[in-house]
Amino acid sequence: MLNGLRNVLRRTETVSFDCYGTLVDWEAGLRAALVEMCGPLDAERLAELFETYLGAEASIEGKGYRPYREVIAKAVQRVTESLMPGQGPGRLPDVTAIVERWTPFPDTCDALARLKKRYRLGVLSNVDPDLFALTARQIPVEFDFVVTAEDVRAYKPAHLHFHRLLNVHAKRESVLHVAQSLFHDGLPARQMGLPFVWINRRHQDNETDVEPLAEFPDLASFADATDEAFQ
Protein backbone atom coordinates (compact mmCIF):
# COMPACT_ATOMS: atom_id res chain seq x y z
CA MET A 1 0.00 0.00 0.00
CA LEU A 2 1.22 3.49 -0.76
CA ASN A 3 2.46 5.26 2.34
CA GLY A 4 0.38 8.31 1.46
CA LEU A 5 -2.85 6.34 1.56
CA ARG A 6 -1.83 4.52 4.74
CA ASN A 7 -1.08 7.80 6.48
CA VAL A 8 -4.38 9.34 5.40
CA LEU A 9 -6.35 6.29 6.53
CA ARG A 10 -4.66 6.37 9.93
CA ARG A 11 -5.39 10.04 10.57
CA THR A 12 -8.92 9.95 9.15
CA GLU A 13 -11.81 10.21 11.60
CA THR A 14 -14.68 10.75 9.15
CA VAL A 15 -15.28 9.05 5.80
CA SER A 16 -17.88 10.67 3.55
CA PHE A 17 -19.39 8.81 0.61
CA ASP A 18 -21.35 9.50 -2.48
CA CYS A 19 -24.31 7.13 -2.39
CA TYR A 20 -25.71 6.34 -5.85
CA GLY A 21 -23.08 4.67 -7.98
CA THR A 22 -20.75 4.18 -5.02
CA LEU A 23 -22.85 2.41 -2.40
CA VAL A 24 -25.96 1.71 -4.44
CA ASP A 25 -26.30 0.19 -7.93
CA TRP A 26 -28.54 2.90 -9.31
CA GLU A 27 -27.41 2.15 -12.88
CA ALA A 28 -28.86 -1.37 -12.88
CA GLY A 29 -32.08 -0.12 -11.33
CA LEU A 30 -32.42 2.73 -13.79
CA ARG A 31 -31.72 0.47 -16.76
CA ALA A 32 -34.46 -1.88 -15.56
CA ALA A 33 -36.86 1.06 -15.31
CA LEU A 34 -35.97 2.22 -18.83
CA VAL A 35 -36.66 -1.24 -20.24
CA GLU A 36 -40.00 -1.30 -18.44
CA MET A 37 -40.97 2.10 -19.86
CA CYS A 38 -39.49 1.76 -23.34
CA GLY A 39 -39.92 -1.94 -24.08
CA PRO A 40 -37.24 -4.49 -25.01
CA LEU A 41 -33.88 -2.94 -25.88
CA ASP A 42 -30.65 -4.53 -27.03
CA ALA A 43 -27.57 -3.97 -24.88
CA GLU A 44 -26.08 -1.33 -27.17
CA ARG A 45 -29.25 0.72 -27.33
CA LEU A 46 -29.78 0.45 -23.58
CA ALA A 47 -26.22 1.66 -22.95
CA GLU A 48 -26.85 4.57 -25.31
CA LEU A 49 -30.05 5.52 -23.51
CA PHE A 50 -28.30 5.37 -20.15
CA GLU A 51 -25.64 7.79 -21.39
CA THR A 52 -28.45 10.00 -22.69
CA TYR A 53 -29.93 9.94 -19.20
CA LEU A 54 -26.61 10.93 -17.60
CA GLY A 55 -26.29 13.88 -19.97
CA ALA A 56 -29.88 14.97 -19.39
CA GLU A 57 -29.54 14.75 -15.62
CA ALA A 58 -26.32 16.80 -15.59
CA SER A 59 -27.91 19.40 -17.87
CA ILE A 60 -31.00 19.76 -15.68
CA GLU A 61 -28.99 19.94 -12.47
CA GLY A 62 -26.68 22.53 -14.00
CA LYS A 63 -29.57 24.94 -14.48
CA GLY A 64 -30.09 25.46 -10.76
CA TYR A 65 -31.63 23.61 -7.88
CA ARG A 66 -34.93 21.84 -8.22
CA PRO A 67 -36.09 18.77 -6.25
CA TYR A 68 -34.31 15.62 -7.35
CA ARG A 69 -37.67 13.97 -7.98
CA GLU A 70 -38.16 16.49 -10.77
CA VAL A 71 -34.63 15.95 -12.07
CA ILE A 72 -35.16 12.18 -12.38
CA ALA A 73 -38.60 12.54 -13.90
CA LYS A 74 -37.53 15.05 -16.52
CA ALA A 75 -34.32 13.21 -17.39
CA VAL A 76 -36.17 9.92 -17.84
CA GLN A 77 -38.79 11.72 -19.91
CA ARG A 78 -36.07 13.06 -22.21
CA VAL A 79 -34.73 9.54 -22.66
CA THR A 80 -38.10 8.08 -23.56
CA GLU A 81 -38.80 10.98 -25.92
CA SER A 82 -35.52 10.26 -27.70
CA LEU A 83 -37.02 6.93 -28.73
CA MET A 84 -40.14 8.60 -30.12
CA PRO A 85 -39.12 12.07 -31.38
CA GLY A 86 -41.86 14.48 -32.30
CA GLN A 87 -44.57 12.80 -30.24
CA GLY A 88 -44.45 15.31 -27.39
CA PRO A 89 -43.93 14.68 -23.68
CA GLY A 90 -45.27 11.48 -22.27
CA ARG A 91 -46.51 10.68 -18.81
CA LEU A 92 -43.95 11.47 -16.11
CA PRO A 93 -42.56 8.32 -14.51
CA ASP A 94 -43.21 7.19 -10.94
CA VAL A 95 -39.97 8.35 -9.34
CA THR A 96 -40.53 6.43 -6.11
CA ALA A 97 -40.90 3.19 -8.07
CA ILE A 98 -37.67 3.96 -9.95
CA VAL A 99 -35.64 4.69 -6.81
CA GLU A 100 -36.97 1.62 -5.02
CA ARG A 101 -35.16 -0.43 -7.69
CA TRP A 102 -31.84 1.06 -6.60
CA THR A 103 -30.32 -1.49 -4.23
CA PRO A 104 -26.90 -1.62 -2.52
CA PHE A 105 -24.05 -3.31 -4.33
CA PRO A 106 -23.39 -6.81 -2.90
CA ASP A 107 -20.25 -5.64 -1.05
CA THR A 108 -21.64 -2.39 0.35
CA CYS A 109 -23.25 -3.38 3.64
CA ASP A 110 -20.38 -5.58 4.84
CA ALA A 111 -17.76 -3.00 3.83
CA LEU A 112 -19.63 -0.20 5.62
CA ALA A 113 -19.96 -2.33 8.75
CA ARG A 114 -16.20 -2.89 8.76
CA LEU A 115 -15.44 0.78 8.19
CA LYS A 116 -17.92 1.84 10.87
CA LYS A 117 -15.73 0.16 13.49
CA ARG A 118 -13.04 2.80 12.86
CA TYR A 119 -14.69 5.88 11.38
CA ARG A 120 -17.65 8.18 11.48
CA LEU A 121 -19.52 7.62 8.21
CA GLY A 122 -21.55 10.13 6.25
CA VAL A 123 -23.19 10.63 2.85
CA LEU A 124 -23.08 13.57 0.44
CA SER A 125 -25.76 12.91 -2.14
CA ASN A 126 -27.58 14.59 -5.03
CA VAL A 127 -30.95 13.39 -3.81
CA ASP A 128 -34.04 14.34 -1.81
CA PRO A 129 -34.22 13.18 1.84
CA ASP A 130 -37.38 11.15 1.28
CA LEU A 131 -35.79 9.29 -1.62
CA PHE A 132 -32.63 8.65 0.39
CA ALA A 133 -34.83 7.19 3.13
CA LEU A 134 -35.94 4.49 0.66
CA THR A 135 -32.27 3.54 0.30
CA ALA A 136 -31.25 3.90 3.94
CA ARG A 137 -33.70 1.23 5.04
CA GLN A 138 -31.79 -1.24 2.84
CA ILE A 139 -28.44 -0.46 4.52
CA PRO A 140 -28.16 -1.80 8.09
CA VAL A 141 -25.41 0.68 9.01
CA GLU A 142 -26.43 3.98 10.58
CA PHE A 143 -24.76 7.00 9.02
CA ASP A 144 -23.56 9.73 11.33
CA PHE A 145 -24.79 12.40 8.94
CA VAL A 146 -26.40 12.82 5.52
CA VAL A 147 -26.15 15.92 3.34
CA THR A 148 -28.65 16.05 0.48
CA ALA A 149 -29.14 18.38 -2.45
CA GLU A 150 -32.27 19.66 -0.75
CA ASP A 151 -30.25 20.57 2.35
CA VAL A 152 -27.82 22.79 0.42
CA ARG A 153 -30.06 23.71 -2.54
CA ALA A 154 -27.41 22.62 -5.02
CA TYR A 155 -26.05 19.62 -6.88
CA LYS A 156 -22.52 18.29 -6.96
CA PRO A 157 -20.06 19.12 -8.50
CA ALA A 158 -20.98 22.42 -6.83
CA HIS A 159 -19.08 22.74 -3.56
CA LEU A 160 -21.96 23.31 -1.15
CA HIS A 161 -22.20 19.67 0.00
CA PHE A 162 -18.53 19.83 0.90
CA HIS A 163 -18.88 23.18 2.65
CA ARG A 164 -21.64 21.69 4.80
CA LEU A 165 -19.42 18.67 5.47
CA LEU A 166 -16.54 20.83 6.72
CA ASN A 167 -18.60 23.49 8.48
CA VAL A 168 -20.91 21.13 10.35
CA HIS A 169 -19.81 17.50 10.33
CA ALA A 170 -16.04 17.05 10.12
CA LYS A 171 -12.63 18.65 10.53
CA ARG A 172 -10.80 19.23 7.26
CA GLU A 173 -7.64 17.45 8.40
CA SER A 174 -9.53 14.32 9.45
CA VAL A 175 -11.93 13.71 6.55
CA LEU A 176 -11.63 11.41 3.51
CA HIS A 177 -14.13 11.44 0.64
CA VAL A 178 -14.89 8.21 -1.24
CA ALA A 179 -16.92 8.05 -4.45
CA GLN A 180 -17.36 6.57 -7.91
CA SER A 181 -17.85 9.75 -9.91
CA LEU A 182 -14.77 11.77 -10.80
CA PHE A 183 -17.02 14.54 -12.13
CA HIS A 184 -19.54 14.87 -9.30
CA ASP A 185 -17.23 14.06 -6.39
CA GLY A 186 -13.58 13.73 -7.33
CA LEU A 187 -13.40 17.16 -8.93
CA PRO A 188 -14.95 19.22 -6.09
CA ALA A 189 -13.15 17.20 -3.41
CA ARG A 190 -9.76 17.85 -4.97
CA GLN A 191 -10.61 21.49 -5.70
CA MET A 192 -11.26 21.89 -1.99
CA GLY A 193 -8.05 20.11 -1.04
CA LEU A 194 -9.71 17.00 0.40
CA PRO A 195 -8.21 13.54 -0.06
CA PHE A 196 -10.32 11.53 -2.49
CA VAL A 197 -10.49 7.77 -3.07
CA TRP A 198 -11.98 6.60 -6.36
CA ILE A 199 -14.23 3.54 -6.31
CA ASN A 200 -14.05 2.71 -10.01
CA ARG A 201 -17.03 0.38 -10.22
CA ARG A 202 -17.56 1.09 -13.93
CA HIS A 203 -13.94 0.19 -14.77
CA GLN A 204 -13.38 3.49 -16.55
CA ASP A 205 -10.18 5.15 -17.67
CA ASN A 206 -9.42 8.37 -15.84
CA GLU A 207 -9.54 10.95 -18.61
CA THR A 208 -9.85 13.90 -16.22
CA ASP A 209 -7.41 16.11 -14.35
CA VAL A 210 -8.51 14.58 -11.04
CA GLU A 211 -5.75 12.64 -9.32
CA PRO A 212 -7.26 10.32 -6.69
CA LEU A 213 -5.26 9.41 -3.64
CA ALA A 214 -6.04 5.79 -4.55
CA GLU A 215 -8.31 3.75 -6.82
CA PHE A 216 -10.23 0.58 -5.96
CA PRO A 217 -12.65 -1.51 -8.06
CA ASP A 218 -15.21 -1.78 -5.25
CA LEU A 219 -15.90 -0.85 -1.65
CA ALA A 220 -14.75 -4.20 -0.28
CA SER A 221 -11.26 -3.57 -1.65
CA PHE A 222 -11.20 -0.17 0.03
CA ALA A 223 -12.24 -1.73 3.34
CA ASP A 224 -9.48 -4.33 2.89
CA ALA A 225 -6.93 -1.54 2.39
CA THR A 226 -8.18 0.16 5.52
CA ASP A 227 -7.70 -3.03 7.53
CA GLU A 228 -4.18 -3.35 6.16
CA ALA A 229 -3.34 0.22 7.13
CA PHE A 230 -3.88 -0.63 10.80
CA GLN A 231 -1.94 -3.89 10.84
Image (spheres, rainbow, N blue to C red):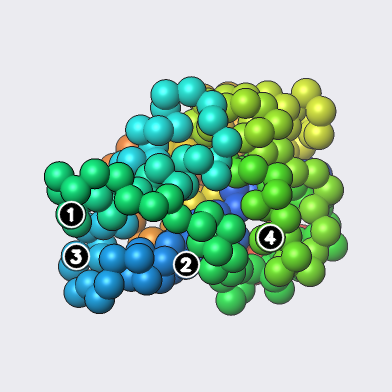
Q: Residue 143 carries which label?
A: none
Total marks placed: 4
SS class, disc 1: loop
Do labels 4 and 2 touch, CB within 8 Å? no
Q: Name the residue under label 2.
A: 29
Mark 1 and mark 2 lie on one chain; the one further toward the N terminus is 2
Q: Name the residue under label 1.
A: 84
SS class, disc 3: helix
Mark 3 and mark 1 lie on one chain; the one further toward the N terminus is 3
Task: Relative to 94, say whether 224 is above or below.
Answer: below
- Identified at 72% across, 27% down, the residue is 164
Q: Which mark is residue 45?
A: 3
Looking at the picture, which amino acid does disc 1 mark? Met
CA distance separating discs 1 and 2: 22 Å
CA distance separating discs 4 and 2: 13 Å
Quadrant where the C terminus sits is: bottom right
Give x and y (percent) for residue 115: 75, 61
- Identified at 18% across, 54% down, the residue is 84
Do labels 1 and 2 touch, CB within 8 Å? no
Q: Name the residue under label 4.
A: 134
Give x and y (percent) for residue 56: 33, 41
Do labels 4 and 3 touch, CB within 8 Å? no
Give x and y (percent) for residue 162: 65, 30
CA distance separating discs 4 and 3: 29 Å
Mark 4 and mark 2 lie on one chain; the one further toward the N terminus is 2
Mark 3 and mark 2 lie on one chain; the one further toward the N terminus is 2
Using the image as rendered, state which of residue 222 and residue 67 is in the foreground.
67
CA distance separating discs 4 and 1: 31 Å
- Identified at 84% across, 62% down, the residue is 117
